[in-house]
Amino acid sequence: MLYKSTRDSSLRLTSAEAIIKGISDEGGLFVPESIPQMSLDTIVSLGDKTYPERAAEIFKLFLDDMTDAEIRYCTDNAYSEKNFDHASVTELAELFEGTYVLELWHGPTCAFKDMALQILPYLLTTSMKKLGVDKKVVILVATSGDTGKAALEGFADVEGTSIMVFYPVDGVSAMQKKQMTTQSGKNVSVCAVKGNFDDCQNGVKAIFTDEAIKEKLSAKGRVFSSANSINWGRLAPQIIYYISAYADLVKNGSIKAGDPVNICVPTGNFGNILAAFYAKRMGLPVNKLICASNSNNVLTDFLTTGVYDRNRDFYTTVSPSMDILISSNLERLLYILTDGNDALIREWFGSLASKGRYEVNEDVKKKLSEEFAAGFADDEACKAEIKKVYDKYSYTLDTHTAVAVKVYEDYKTRTGDETRTIIASTASPYKFGTAVLEAITGSAPEDEFEKVDKLFEVSSFPVPASLAALKTKAVRFDKTVDRAEMADFVLETVEKI
Ligand SMILES: *Cc1c(COP(=O)(O)O)cnc(C)c1O
């Protein structure tokens, strides 16, 4: 299995090379040259395996330059009980008849990003060993809140790596900020940026593709890589839990092998839902992929009209991890839907960079409407949904998952589609306590840790130990820079960590 770039189909890299590089030199994203297939029997047989075993089976298909032993080393360490508070790693809760919430937040930072970022450091360091890379890898991360902490937690004190995280100064929740700025580890650094997530992401992308900076780093024996979902090593682990959840539903008798399911995903950078799309193309019986957005509904418009237009107001919402107007992973989807037409991708994404807009052709529009449904929920609708689900089903949703549940219910009413549905639950409600408590009880205490206590009273979920421990941790990182100063920050910090 080799990897090519969405902007240069002639490239061929091994998975180890693609994971180390993160993003291709000409700005494209790495994609497998073909999508491996899994038979229904194989999918169903996963039901009898542990999560690390399931993960290894699926990784083998994508990372065939690694040995079985290397893959098992990665999956056993990443998905151990040391890191996840559930032996099954993820948990499937039936919210109401035929609708299942796939809880992906039982890892150390209480968001689904852990599913990929606990394993990425193992995949990366294993890849480096394989290729004999003796440079230190510098991981640059742009975050809307959850990726940053999950990446810090994954890479802290990992030999041969260092990590720098940039977050929008006013764009993350108080708990997310506290999680990041108190991070321990000798090889970590965190910096706020005056701007929004797109500014952070564009800043990081510009540094990655800046030859002068790369040369300076190389002279110091260092090389950049990415822990954002532009890295294939982030995306591949997310395919696993959809296939795994399906196997569980068959095993517990909720569905019969071969029954189709819908998958609904609260979406920002389009990584999580793209992983569900890959699962479908691998053979998972999926009917519709339902893309849920908040008020930053650029994807709702795109999936319904074929026009991607980021020239619009940006909203800071109660679901900050979805406050994104440039969804990077859409590039991978469009590459697949155009059968690998790199010229078209260069044209569309060139237009996005210069005009902030592109329109796909009729063929792609047709495919998008066959595979996807889309909708959005604003903050008011999101909070109303949290309250409704709490009152009706005694289940406490976080603000991101609530957007997805609302969009799914709207979809079901609109279409009458009764297909059983898996809704990706991307964060613990404890991470977004203010909005969740306001929705349920009408108000929230000021203090972050009083919020935690209050949420414990309200929800039936145990307090995540990692969040409780933050109370006594000191802030280590309090620097804020302009977008234009990000490169200087990187060059200065690289000397120190
Ligand atoms: C990152 C994140 C999302 C969005 O996921 P994408 O892969 O970027 O689409 C949704 N919810 C939460 C809680 C997240 O952390």
Image (cartoon, rainbow, N blue to C red):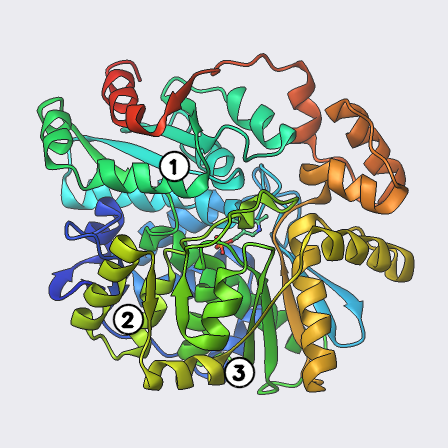
Residue 497 lies, with reference to residue 87, above or below; the image says above
- Tell me: is circle 2 under 8 Å from ligand 1: no
Residue 168 lies, with reference to residue 15, above or below; the image says above
Under mark 2, the amino acid is Tyr
Residue 72 lies, with reference to residue 465, above or below; the image says below
Q: Is residue 67 visible?
A: no
* Horizontal arrangement in the rendering, residue 214 relative to residue 72 (left or right): left
Determine the residue positioned at 33% across, 75% down: 360
Q: Position of residue 430 (x, y in %)?
A: 72, 38
Q: Which residue is mark 3?
A: 285
Under mark 1, the amino acid is Cys
Of the 4 image quadrants, the one containing the N terminus is bottom left
Q: Nearer the viewer, residue 350 or 177?
A: 350
Quarter of the rendering containing residue 248: bottom right
Q: Secondary structure at mark 3?
A: loop
Q: Position of residue 41 (x, y in %)?
A: 50, 83
Of the 4 image quadrants, the one containing the C terminus is top left
